[in-house]
Image (spheres, rainbow, N blue to C red):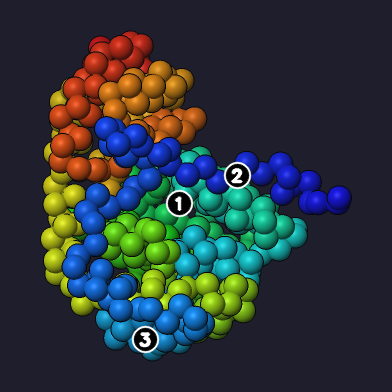
Amino acid sequence: MRLRPEIIALPAYRQGKAAAASAFKLSSNENPFGPLPGVIAAVGAETTYNRYPDASASELRERLAARYGLSPDEVHVGSGSVALLSQLILAAAGPGDEVVYSWRSFEAYPSLVTVAGATSVQVPNRPDHGHDLTAMAAAITDRTRVLIVCSPNNPTGTIVHAAEFEAFMAVVPSTLLVILDEAYAEFVTDPDAVRGISLLGRYPNLVVLRTFSKAYGLAGLRVGYGLGPVAILDAARATAIPLSVTGVASAAAIASLDVDDELMERVRTIGTRRDTIWRALTEQGWNTPAPQGNFIWLPTGAETGVAAEALGAAGLVVRPFPEGIRISIGEEESVEELLRTCAELVQNLPIGHSARRLG
């Protein structure tokens, strides 16, 4: 059987580890709050499973277009923002082309680029774990077709500031597609953070991605959306798997928009919990970036395996990466054990470790 060798070599996407009933699952950046009653009712009312869904999710697109002051054609809905990423990369890049992004960032980026047949150009994060946009701009060649900016960055939680993003866009050729991945935008509280939706009219090569998976708590239904120029979104639509957004997902997303105020109150609760945890970690001696998503980043490096094992033994299922550990903000009941375990971990880090403030 002849298969593409670069696909065979790809590691499969690794979902956050499942948690035992007695443990807290803090590995997948899920919303710890269940769906609101109105959302559950809308899902229950969607019972025509014998019929195909509206292929373009037109009602949801119209609602989002009205929300953001766009036309429905400037909105594209897909089965999660990762599906839209795939479609956009396929539309713009192929064999011999390059896709530039910061690293470490969302772990699906390398796989999506490889599947398209293109080549990844990974630009190292700055020492503060944020995007080095100057270096990303310098990495552009005549083979570059796509640049991906993730703010807040998954898994480090850092943001791109509005001023630095605008400086970046000023030097990026308008012929290159720039994807601003804002999957966690609703959790951002820094007033200086980039807000991609406000920039759409200024840049004809910019697409902004959002999702209902995180802030809206619909991770299990898979619905995300992209906002941007019609020509670019039409190209993405041409690469999409037809009928991939179910009627149930669309109904849940529309119902979620109807209860936006209640959902955003939950987001504020998660943000407050996040900031409380981060301040406590800093006081313990951790050197970790100020988070702006619904997760915390511990840059444990070579100590990651030991730290993740200790957290797991404490009933806290987290997401380890080679460079560190991402910990989702979960239930209030998880906080005390998380902070207790982290206090022990930071004391055991080697002197001079980059994740440790203490001497």
Q: Amino acid at mark 3?
A: Glu
Q: Amino acid at mark 2?
A: Ala
Q: Residue at x 16, y 57 (%)?
A: 266
Kindly identify which numbered label has been placed on residue 133: 1
Name the residue at 24% across, 16% down: 344
Rendering coords of residue 235 (x, y %)? 59, 78
Helix, strand or loop under label 1:
helix
Name the secondary structure under disc 3: helix
Circle 3 residue? 59
First in residue order: circle 1 vs circle 3: 3
Residue 260 is marked as none
Which of the two labelled residues, at mark 2 and mark 3, occupies the earlier sequence position? 2
Q: Which image quadrant is residue 141 in?
A: bottom right
Residue 265 in the image: above or below residue 315: below
Q: Earlier in the sequence, mark 1 or mark 2?
A: 2
Q: Amino acid at mark 1?
A: Leu
The picture quadrant where one finds residue 200 is: bottom left
